[in-house]
Amino acid sequence: MKSWSGLDIPPLSNKFIFPQLSLLDTASQKKKELPKKDIYRMYVCGITPYDATHLGHANTYLAFDLIHRYLLATHAKVIFVQNITDIDDPLLERANRDGVDWKDLANSQIDLFRSDMVALHVLPPDHYIGAVEAIPLVVESIKTLQKRESVYLVDQDLYFSVHADKEFGSRSHLSEPEMLERFSQRGGDPTRAGKKNPLDALLWLAQRPNEPGWPSEFGTGRPGWHIECCAIALNYLNIDENALISIDIQGGGSDLIFPHHEMSAAQSRVMNGKEFASHYVHAGMIGLDGEKMSKSKGNLLFVSQLLKDGIDPMAIRIALLSHHYRADHMWRDQDLSSAQIFLSELRISLARMEVAPTDGVIQELIEAMSDDLNTPEVILILQDWIYETNSGTTGGSAGELSRAIDSILGIAT
């Protein structure tokens, strides 16, 4: 599947020091440094394209864009893969409700998502892979799991025995009742008759009446959700056979911790014997009107609508970065108003011939970002610099600071 257009990232001077990036790892529940490497592998779960792109999505993809940018600024290579679940029950349900072809609905929302990412200055993935195009990889992955004796039939559907992974549950830290509740709420089928364990995950769904299906040696059907991401990640991230862990970062919103990321990691571990990720990194949820922003609640605020209303996409980016990426928070109009004022003041200051010193500001910015992407601290650092510049302090390079803000924060000034 086609990704979106790339962006030029301004180079930074070698005089700036980049500490190793520390990120909170959900599995260990600790903030850990990423090891120093020449190549990092990052997989971020994409959207199911029946509505795109609301501010909850934007918050997630901005967080991983910041990680991407920071690692690139250290002169490392980043292999970045993102999927798009272009076949799934919610997509089919929305298409049936609206009386449209599910493929047309998916394509329209994928196009909208791409344009939103371009507007928000999100760097594109190296590989942007749809579930449909990944079906051959899914089939091969299921065959590998069969060889590991972790697959069984329920009627004509295939299931994965989650406890084939002895580490199952170690990434999400939930009790079994909590797992069952979330599994039921998030696309699982814990009460289905014939399953060996209520938490076992669907791998291959046999074709149902009036639903699409693809031929395979398991019969005509379509992939389960978790195996889709597992298969794409292991096949497109060029896994190092000698490494003890498959990839560096598995990312997404915190609503994916369980079941999605736990089950994808379990399947991956059974397939190749390695822990799936060094860091399981999760962005917080965005709320509106007192509730989490979600499609099921219908309380969505779309990036595309804000753009149509004439909002500068950099103001949207700043409004989201004013909160820590892991923090759940309610979207407030005041956040956007404050971001617009800040963006205007920043651009005015950067346009001055004489500005306050910038080397220390850039270094402080880098150090704040290295500490689990502390963007609220970055905003304060820049506000202090604006104040100093407006007070008449001189000795800095506006151009160098502007390049750093663009390169590291993705904010075009």
Image (spheres, helix red, strand yellow):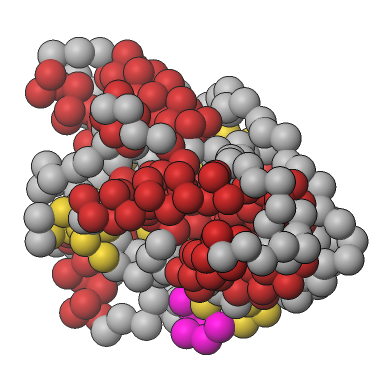
Residue 346 is at least partly visible in this image: yes
Query: Percent from the top left, x then y, of residue 126?
Result: 68, 38
Residue at left offset 37%, top offset 46%: 340
Is 119 placed left or right of 311 in the picture? right
- Asked whether 203 falls inside the magenta stretch, the response is no
Q: Is residue 28 in the magenta section? A: yes
Percent of width and height locating residue 156: 30, 40
What x and y, as percent, mark residue 204? 38, 42
Left or right relative to 241: residue 220: left
Give the quarter of the image for residue 32: bottom right
Front-most of 257 and 132? Answer: 257
Name the outermost residue toward the front: 392
Q: How many marks?
A: 0
Is 279 left, or right, of 400 in this rendering?
left
State left or right for residue 242 relative to residue 201.
right
Q: Report the front residue among 136 and 284.
A: 284
The quadrant the N terminus occupies is: top right
- Residue farthest right in this picture: 14
Q: Inspect this view and state whether residue 407 appears.
A: no
Name the image quarter holding residue 262. Answer: bottom left
Q: Nearer the viewer, residue 222 or 56?
A: 56
User: Magenta part of the protein: which range?
Assistant: 26-31
Q: Give the residue drawn at x 22%, y 66%.
A: 182
Q: Nearer the viewer, residue 185 or 137?
A: 185
Q: Quadrant of residue 147?
A: bottom right
- Residue at horizontal 55%, vertical 44%? 347
> Magenta region, mostly helix, strand or loop?
loop
Q: Residue at x 37, y 82 (%)?
A: 173
Residue 116 versus residue 158 in the image, above or below: above
Tell me the quadrant of the picture where the C terminus can be found: top right
